[in-house]
Image (spheres, helix red, strand yellow):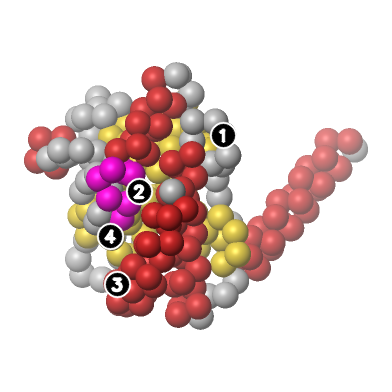
Amino acid sequence: MPLLQRVMDPDLERLAAERVVPSLRAHGFCYVDNFLGEFVGHIVLGQVKSLHHAGLLHDGQLACRGVAVSRRSVRGDKIAWVGGAEKGCESINFLLTLIDKLISLCTGRLGMTRIRERSKAMVACYPGNGSGYVKHVDNPNGDGRCVTCIYYLNKNWNANEHGGILRIFPGGKSYVADIEPLFDRLVLFWSDRRNPHEVQPSYSQRYAITVWYFDSEERAEAKRRFRVLSESTQGSSAS
């Protein structure tokens, strides 16, 4: 793995400079095919399937739990949060390392030096029963998420038959972007209100790994607001 990573470093620099940064600037999103290659991508897929078959994926949650709406009518995926250091997740960790490098190469060129951390990886599976995820924004209220990265793992995917398209509605644009969740495809887009998006109903098992990169100042402010709200709530309960 380390040798492969060294070989790929110049490719990542070229990818950042020639593809990702210009596309993010012009459109707010970008996708890259053959990100890991067939061999490594197949190993990542095997580890994701192992997590799934071991029963470690659970129903994805909604941020607004107080809303009287069926969770399954909003999102139908099953997920697990992975840091990368877990046993059996070595190739997922390798994927995360490469995405980290790509993002670090992009942030300097974009003048976004405040991106210094990311979430754990969300391993997700739509079970293929017609479930999807309705139109939403990852970060509508300033929680710190700045860039969304999704890596797809679906071999022989045919959108006409299997559905499961990621549809992005770029803010201020007259078009939508339909992105098929093809094996070894990496998608990047701004996480805020510039990119509402949806996952259309999937009719075959659909695997993806998602990570979010944080703007450190916005993240710190979001944590401060949460702390103040929690202290206020606790104070109200005690009085």
Q: SS of the residue at dot 4?
A: strand
Q: SS of the residue at dot 2?
A: strand
Q: Which residue is mark 3?
A: 19
Residue 229, horizontal then vertical, whole percent: 74, 50
Identify the residue shown where x is 35% and y is 31%. 46
- Label 4 Cα neighbours within 10 Å, binned few <14 / some 14-19 / many ≥20: some
Nearest to N terminus: mark 3 or mark 2: 3
Tell me which amino acid carries mark 2. Answer: Tyr
Of labels 3 and 1, the one closer to you: 1
Nearest to N terminus: mark 3 or mark 4: 3
Identify the residue shown where x is 52% and y is 37%. 81
- State the CA–CA distance, disc 3 to disc 2: 17 Å
- Label 2 Cα neighbours within 10 Å, binned few <14 / some 14-19 / many ≥20: many
- State the CA–CA distance, disc 4 to disc 2: 9 Å
Q: Which residue is mark 2?
A: 151
Q: Are marks 3 and 4 in contact (CB under 8 Å)?
A: yes
- State the CA–CA distance, disc 3 to disc 4: 8 Å
- State the CA–CA distance, disc 1 to disc 2: 19 Å
Identify the residue shown where x is 37% and y is 39%. 44
Name the foreground residue: 204 vs 11. 11
Tell me which amino acid carries mark 1. Answer: Glu
- Label 1 Cα neighbours within 10 Å, binned few <14 / some 14-19 / many ≥20: few
- State the CA–CA distance, disc 1 to disc 4: 27 Å
Q: Which residue is mark 4?
A: 32
Boundaries of the magenta span: 35-41
Residue 205, horizontal then vertical, whole percent: 26, 29
* Residue positioned most to the top: 54
Q: Which residue is mark 1?
A: 86
Tell me which amino acid carries mark 3. Answer: Arg
Q: Are marks 3 and 2 in contact (CB under 8 Å)?
A: no
